[in-house]
Amino acid sequence: MDVYLLTLVLFSIGIYCIVRKRNVIKTIIGVIILEYAVNLFFILSAYRTEGRAPIFMQEEEIVNMVDPLPHALVLTAIVIGLATTALLVGIAMRLYEKYGTFDITKIKELKG
């Protein structure tokens, strides 16, 4: 249960960075933290105490099987998160080239 609470803390830190920070780079870091908090939650939801891999074996029956679907979803989410991060960093680089700052309030004031 403590691990789920820590996942919630990570999620809250990501939301805080997205909402409260005025720097584009800090906002991107908040998005990354948020993505990994959700991935961690999915991995923890598939965890079973003394669980075994879902490998078919003839001689014994697997009683406590680990669910492989969240692991596959997280693997896909990691790839999508990497592409999203690359896109956000590319947009941040273009903003810096055009305006010379990462501060959102100064970018709003320039209007050009």
Image (cartoon, grey):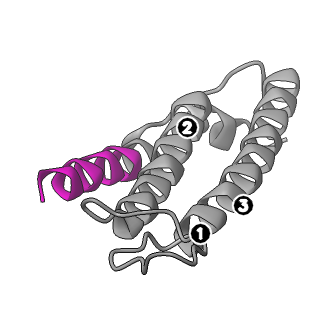
The x, y position of residue 24, in whole percent, is 61, 34
Q: Secondary structure at mark 2?
A: helix
**Cα distance in 3D space between marks 1 and 3:** 22 Å
Left or right, residue 13 beside residue 18: left
Q: Earlier in the sequence, mark 1 or mark 2?
A: 1
Q: What residue span does the magenta drawing correspond to?
A: 1-16
Left or right, residue 74 beside residue 86: left
Q: Secondary structure at mark 3?
A: helix
Give the residue at mark 1. Answer: 55
Residue at 75% of width from left, 56% of height from top?
Answer: 80
Which of 61 and 26 lies nearest the eye of the viewer? 61
Q: Earlier in the sequence, mark 1 or mark 3?
A: 1
**Cα distance in 3D space between marks 1 and 2:** 55 Å
Residue extending farthest to the top is 100
Q: Amino acid under label 1?
A: Ile
Q: Nearer the viewer, mark 1 or mark 3?
A: 1
Residue at 55% of width from left, 42% of height from top?
Answer: 32
Q: Amino acid under label 2?
A: Thr
**Cα distance in 3D space between marks 3 and 2:** 35 Å
Q: Nearer the viewer, mark 1 or mark 2?
A: 1
| Label 1 crowd (10 A; few <14 / some 14-19 / many >=20) | few
Q: Is residue 9 magenta?
A: yes
Residue extending farthest to the front is 59
Q: Nearer the viewer, mark 3 or mark 2?
A: 3
Which of 40 and 95 lies nearest the eye of the viewer? 40
Residue 105 badge: 2
Q: Are marks 1 and 3 in contact (CB under 8 Å)?
A: no
Residue at 67% of width from left, 56% of height from top?
Answer: 75
Give the residue at mark 3. Answer: 76
Query: Which secondary structure dominates the residues rendered in magenta?
Result: helix
Height in image: 48 above or below 24? below
